[in-house]
Image (cartoon, rainbow, N blue to C red):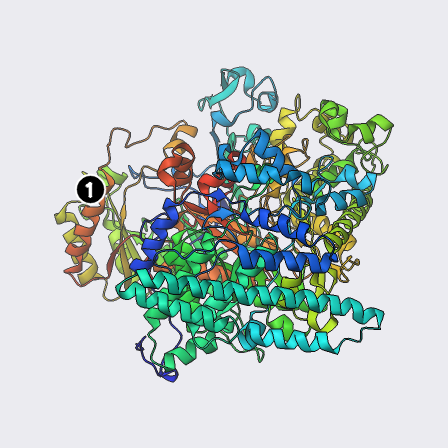
Amino acid sequence: MIMEKTENKGIIFDIQKFTVHDGPGIRTNVFLKGCPLRCLWCSNPEGLRSKPQVGVYSNRCIGIDKCGLCLRVCPKAEEGALVIKDNRIDHINRNVCTDCLLCAEECPSQGTLKIWGREMSVPEVLEIVLADREFYEKSGGGITLSGGEVFRQSAFARELLEACKTEGINTCVESALHCDPDLLDIVYPQVDLVITDIKHMDSEIHKTLTGIGNQRILDNIKKTATMGLPLVIRVPVVAEHNNDDINLRATAEFIANNLGNQVKQVQLLPYRELGVDKYEALGMAYPMADFTPPERIVWEADIHHLVELMQEYGIPVVAGTTIKYDI
Amino acid sequence: MQNPNSTNLNEIDACGVVPINKEWGIGVSGVENPSPFSRTNQILKRWRDTKWSVDHERAVLLTQAYKKYAGLSQQLKTASAVAHILENVTIRIYPDELIVGEIGAPAKAAPIYPEFSYGWVQRELKESPFRDRPIVAHVTSEKTEKELLGISDFWLGQTVEDEAISLLTEDQIKATHLGKAVFSLQLYLHGGVGHTHLNFKEVLNLGYGGMLEKIQQKFDACDNTLPQDIKKREFYQSQLIVLKGMIEYCNRYARLAMNEAKSATGERQKELVKIAENCSHIATGTPRSLWEAAQLMQFTYNLIMIESNGHSVSYGRMDQDLYPFYKKDRENGVTKEWQQEMLESLFLKWAEMCKIRDWGTISNNGGHGMGGTTITVGGINPDGSDATNDLSYMIVDATVHTRLGEPWLAVRWHKNTPRDFKIKCANAIRVGFGRPKLFNDEVCIPSMERYGRSPEDSKNYAVVGCVEIDAPGKEYGWHDAAYFSMPKVLELALNNGRCFECESVGKDLCPRYSICAAKGQRLGLETGSLAEFSSFEEVKTAYDKQMQYMCDQMVGAINSVDIAHQRRKPLPALSLLTEGCAEKGMDVSAGGAIYNYSGPQAVGVGTVADGLSAIKQLVFDEKKVTGGEFLTALLSNWEGYEWLHALVNSEKVHHYGNDDAYADELAAFGADTYCKHIENRPTAHGGVFLPGVYSVTANVGLGLILWASPDGRKAQEPISDNCGAVHNKAGAHDVQGPTAMLKSVCKLDHVRMGNGTLLNMKYSPTSVSGEAGRDNFIDMVDSYFGMGGLHCQFNIISKETLEDAYENPAEHENLLVRVAGYSAFFNDLSKPTKLDIMDRTELSFD
């Protein structure tokens, strides 16, 4: 299928070079903004909304008396969009703010007002990705599209991935796969590896954990396998939420019985309290604020137990992301 | 899988004793018993239980000899003094060791070398004793203090330092640390030069007996009527004096070992008898086994350390030099395990040697170090094929099994280095003690050739000290001749040749004030000010002119110090171990070596790049501030210009280290301008100058005396280290991760920087964990070297560990970190250096 060249632009909230855990080799991760899921443990809250946003890191502000540039350019300053406390910008009143981004563009200090979400064209992203070509070639790495949800921007994703393939760059997509299955047909021809996750096998519980049921996701995972795409499946192991034997056995059975031999690796990942500062910067409540994670020794033992349990089903399950697999 | 103990060498691939893919753990440098050999662990315990100290005996014997031989020529006097020490200094053999020999002082005791400089020894003994130093303390007995003070009068005005200073011009003095350093000469003003390789091949092939015969023939062949022959005869005579002293030194250890064997029992008795035989045989003979070869290397190294306290005398390509002995032993049925255990004993001897330096140097650099006693392994053969062998693996293992400050380890990495060996190296690096450091053959060899070495010698390069590539046994490279502050040159270029500080607050504190501003002078040239420049080109032109002027001052000053060394401290022992000297009949200090260079280092390439970038972007491209405002901000140390300070430190300004051509081109300009005014200028000992770009820790010291700089640095903060990016207190400037950093570094011309470049990278343990982490790490190095990088080295320790070590030093006694070209115990570092290491961007893979 040949698609027409479009003027597609993507909303990117981060590009990270030299990532080594999301696909083989040394990679560049491009994070697309906007996600239909609301996972309780999400560590990238800046990737949820589609529109660009400003995050506030008050501790980095050099002082309104010494600077004050944000107040000078903010069109809603008089209405109190920027809230000042102790001579520093404290937070943004999101009810007033129009996300015009002017304050962050003017702010001289690194990271006080941080913009998450930039409109970028395919050639702009490609240039950054190609800069590390030497490293991909040596290590078998390439680009990983992540999010947010990649399939929310499927036209842009498809065009970017196609451009990468044309350059001979290995491509990987990391997605929750909660999307119209037809989009897979559009994007997958440009993809070398799919990384997805199974958060819970029970659709009702899945809904309480992520805001949506899992039927579409599981169907799409099956479709991915049927289409012959190499697949890595991750399971975020969160105590008191999804780490019971019953769920993991169900997950293992699904992988063993429904996906043929397409799964390259199943990775069990621990819950980490990451991203809390980002929630705060965005003025969002951390959904798992009341949750006290177990001690490291406990969750490590838990994960190893679950790895052994899932191995009974003959699937290539491992703890963490640092064990090599071939694609 | 091959049998590691097979005696048929054709059957075994190079592999070492422990499995190639053995993982020692990640970020675990401080373990108690790192070796599988109990002997190694026992000696390590003794090492830890022994305090650093100072010993007076060498200094006292030297002074005696200078008095006794007062009438002799300087060449003969210095030779006789070395022989006097060899023949009379107290010697010892320590429990468990298989290799014996000392540098004229007990284990972990620093000898004193009054002939180079003595003012600081006297001053510190009286005012701030070595034992009371807050870091790097050395205990001293009352007797030692008394003896050392007793010889001060003799050395007053008689040292190399005294003569060197008398040769400097007033402009040179203004620019050195005697004023407030634009460049620091400290190292060679206060001590010997070192920074070379010993010609171990000659000793291993001829033995001292063979060398004695060779020199005797040359001596006999001199025509005593010819003026040039009279000088040669004097030189050969000095060598004969040293050789005779050396043979006696070996025999003294043989007698001591035999004596101790009498009272020893069991296995130790047998070992001591064998040690006695070894020492006795190699006093004149050539080694018959790896053990004897190692003992001969050790004695030879001791000789050079007794002669001079020059730093960074390195071991060269040990896996190549010793391989014939190793192979013969294996064919004779000696096990690989035994050879490994013996090698570890040798490594531990090398860790026993120590030196003391003046507090001014130590407070910046820290360390008890020998500078950089670097072993080089790997690389290629003369025909271009891979040279990695069994000993290469064993040497990496020995380094991991001993984990002390010395010796250092360099690996020559090239296109055909076996993947197995890369895995071995990566696993060693992941231990987190900063070794080995890696060098790229594909860049080092062309750089060797560029500065006039033969293709064969270029292929045989080895690493001296931190990163200085050198033709082993054939070169006297003066590799650490000075540290030069490029940011200071930029300051003068922005302010019409005047120091910022002088116009701000500090003129009364400046030691050069009376010979500078007070006389209506300025430190640099009048080349205009940022307030007046109408284009960025004018900034660059001013930088170029100031650079030329300061390079002139430095070249002149280094050559003056060079001349003082030649006159006051000829080196007959080192001349024996440097090819060319015997043939020319000339001392190595005067230019006897085949290759001669002087290599001063430029510091602060990142600081200059980001300073120029900020000025170009904000003053000339975007016109956000005027040149005058920017200058005022700098003069006021950013006070009142906090927003500009923040902006300059933010991502909104182009920064070196992010694979951003805008800033990276300015880094190349900053460094090339330095190289242009340094390279190929004549040195006093008959060679040419080689530029290098690295700082070791001089970036901290040079930063302490520098006012604010336009990269967003406040006064006194460190300038950027080595080839690294800026990491000011207000923020690290490399924010795009390691691949971008590596690509930026590759935009510098590493071949041109013949005295070496250096890149430190720090990773958290999680970023290199697992097989995937290890392999990505190797692939990253391969990519970097494929793009033209010369060197890299790694700290793999979590920031939490460093912070904890900073707060609770007692719990981290064994924590080794990579400082610059070397690793040091974290606790031995000064506070600013500790902070500097902690602030280096922690590059994470995840």
> Residue, x 67% and y 60% (percent of image)?
B477
The percent coordinates of residue A39 (x first, y second) are 30, 39
What amino acid is labelled 1 in the image?
Answer: Val
Q: Is residue B757 left or right of residue B110?
A: right
Residue at 20% in and 40% down:
A239
Q: In this view of the protein, can residue B773 be seen by the observer?
A: no
- Residue A141, compared with residue B704, is above or below; it is below
Is A192 or B129 nearer to us in this picture?
B129
* Residue B194 image point, x, y percent: 62, 56
Side of A99 relative to B486 (left or right) = left
Give above or below for B800 relative to A289. Answer: below
Q: Quick check: can you spot residue B255?
A: yes
**Foreground pick, B719 / A196:** B719
Give the farthest residue toward the front: B68
How many neighbours does mark 1 have within 10 angstroms: few (below 14), some (14-19), or many (20 or more)?
few
Q: Percent position (x, y) of residue B335?
A: 33, 74
Q: Quadrant of residue B826?
A: top left
Residue extending farthest to the left is A246
What percent of the width, then of the height, locates residue B280? 46, 70
Left or right, residue B830 beside residue B49: right
Residue, disc 1 = A298
Residue drawn where x is 66% and y is 24% of the image: B641
Picture quarter with the C terminus of chain A: bottom left
